[in-house]
Amino acid sequence: MSNAWLTRAIFTGANLTDANLCRTGLTKATLTYANLVGACLVGTNLTEAKLACANLTGVDLTHTYLTGANLTGAILTETINLSLS
């Protein structure tokens, strides 16, 4: 799915383990309770995405846009290049 535009997509509770979502447009997407363990999110646009309670263990967030994203309760263990500024 890399390089896809999935604005406002709904992936609530989805198992996206090891998914290739690099450079994907997931603006305002719902990924609440999604399992993203080991997924590639390099360069992904997650602006205003809902990631509450999502499992992002081991995810590479290099150049990932998280402006306005909801990460409440998200599991961020061993994430790479997480910047919440």
Image (spheres, helix red, strand yellow):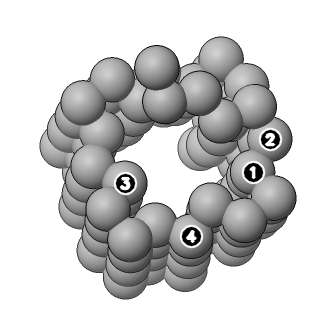
Q: Position of residue 14 (x, y in %)?
A: 44, 78
Q: Given contact means CB atoms under 8 Å apart, are the residues at marks 1 and 4 in contact?
A: no
Report the amino acid beneath label 2: Ile
Compute the Cα span from label 1 to label 4.
Answer: 9 Å
**Outermost residue, front direction?**
85
Indicate the amino acid at tag 1: Thr
Q: Quadrant of the N terminus?
A: top right
Label 1–label 2 contact, CB within 8 A: yes
Spatial separation of the CA atoms under disc 3 and disc 4? 9 Å
Q: Which amino acid type is marked by label 4?
A: Ile
Disc 4 to disc 2, C-alpha distance: 13 Å
> Height in image: 73 above or below 70?
below
Q: Are marks 3 and 4 in contact (CB under 8 Å)?
A: no
* Residue behind mark 2: 80
Place of residue 31 in the rendered image (x, y in percent of width and height, measured from the top left): 34, 62
Q: Nearer the viewer, residue 32 or 73?
A: 73
The image quarter in which residue 38 lies: bottom right
Q: Quadrant of residue 57?
A: bottom right
Q: Which mark is residue 71?
A: 3
Residue located 56% across and 70% down the image: 75
SS for tag 3? loop
Label 3 packing within 10 angstroms: few (<14), some (14-19), many (20+): many
